[in-house]
């Protein structure tokens, strides 16, 4: 018993300590860090969970009731009835109503994720076998983001989640993410922001998030993409405006996207 209480307490305590990445004995979602994720968590906790529990309890009750009430000794001559219109209408209508009740708020959340407000920062995430590339199209910045191998991990860097060059975005700003892939299907997913979009070669998917708290957030490629699918994590560092400007200054030099012949050509053509 003591052990169970101890485990329960660790779950409670650790859930507040490590907000932005999975932790041992985790139940439920990672903590929300955007409005979108808060909506998802509320939808799950306040609507889906009660419905799931109510249906499970009801079905369990029916099964137990049928086992006891209609067991052979209590009910030696079984009824021959096969149809009951009232019951059949009810067990079709009630599940339909439950689905409609679930669908309305669910569509609301889906549409709010789909309509992108005016973006403050636009980034492009490109999935490769097996790493992510990030581009800031307005800043001429491009860099690759590789997972840090176990042997190179520094303290506080979570295994299989930390990367060498993380995506850096300002806090409380609308970040538009354009997602695509270069080889096979990948998916850019960040649980704390409630973001998950497929990265499809030859096509750009868009989504957005507005991170509400400064910190480091981790996600993973969420589309089975090949042998190293599990080793292309996503790390997003949310910083203050000033820190972001500082980072931009460095990044524009360190990660300057090369000017290719094609770019030169476009420049000349536009003149
Ligand atoms: Cu992938």
Image (tube, rainbow, N blue to C red):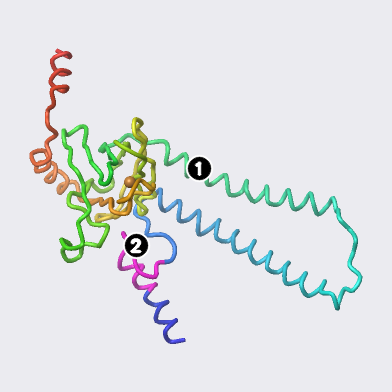
Q: Residue at x 83, y 52 (%)?
A: 86
Q: Spatial distance from mark 2 to mark 1, Cα to Cα?
A: 27 Å
Mark 2 or 1, closer to the camera: 2
Q: Which residues are magenta?
A: 11-26
Q: Position of residue 142 (x, y in %)?
A: 18, 38
The residue nearer to you, when weighing 203 against 60, is 203
Q: Can you tell which quarter of the image residue 259 is in?
A: top left
Q: Residue at x 17, y 41 (%)?
A: 143
Badge 2: residue crowd in 10 Å (few <14, some 14–19, many ≥20): some
- The residue that label 2 is drawn on is 22
> In the figure, is residue 164 to the left or right of 223?
left
- The residue that label 1 is drawn on is 108
Q: Residue at x 23, y 41 (%)?
A: 133
Badge 1: residue crowd in 10 Å (few <14, some 14–19, many ≥20): few
Q: Residue at x 30, y 65 (%)?
A: 18
> In the figure, is residue 38 to the left or right of 52?
left
Helix or strand or loop: what does disc 1 sit on?
A: helix
Q: Are marks 2 and 1 in contact (CB under 8 Å)?
A: no
* Residue 47 is a magenta residue: no
């Amino acid at each position: 018993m003591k052990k169970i209480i101890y485990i329960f307490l660790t779950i409670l305590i650790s859930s507040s300590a490590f907000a932005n990445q999975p932790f041992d004995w985790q139940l439920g979602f990672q903590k929300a860090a955007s409005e979108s994720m808060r909506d998802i968590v509320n939808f799950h906790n306040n609507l889906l969970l009660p419905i799931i529990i109510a249906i499970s309890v009801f079905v369990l009750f029916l099964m137990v009731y049928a086992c006891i009430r209609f067991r052979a000794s209590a009910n030696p001559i079984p009824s021959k009835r096969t149809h009951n219109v009232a019951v059949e209408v009810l067990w079709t209508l009630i599940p339909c109503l439950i689905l409609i009740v679930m669908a309305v708020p669910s569509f609301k959340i889906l549409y709010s994720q789909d309509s992108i407000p005016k973006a403050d920062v636009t980034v492009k995430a490109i999935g490769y076998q097996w790493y992510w590339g990030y581009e800031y199209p307005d800043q001429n910045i491009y860099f690759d983001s590789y997972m840090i191998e176990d042997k190179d991990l520094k303290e506080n860097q979570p295994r299989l989640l930390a990367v060498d060059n993380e995506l850096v975005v300002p806090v409380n700003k609308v970040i538009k993410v354009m997602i695509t892939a270069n080889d096979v299907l990948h998916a850019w997913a960040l649980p704390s922001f409630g973001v998950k979009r497929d990265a499809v070669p030859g096509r750009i998917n868009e989504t957005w998030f507005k991170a509400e708290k400064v910190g480091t957030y981790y996600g993973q490629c969420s589309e089975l993409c090949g042998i190293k699918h599990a080793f292309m994590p996503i790390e997003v560092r949310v910083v203050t405006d000033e820190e972001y400007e500082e980072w931009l200054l460095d990044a524009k030099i360190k990660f300057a996207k090369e000017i290719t012949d094609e770019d030169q050509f476009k420049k000349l053509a536009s003149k």
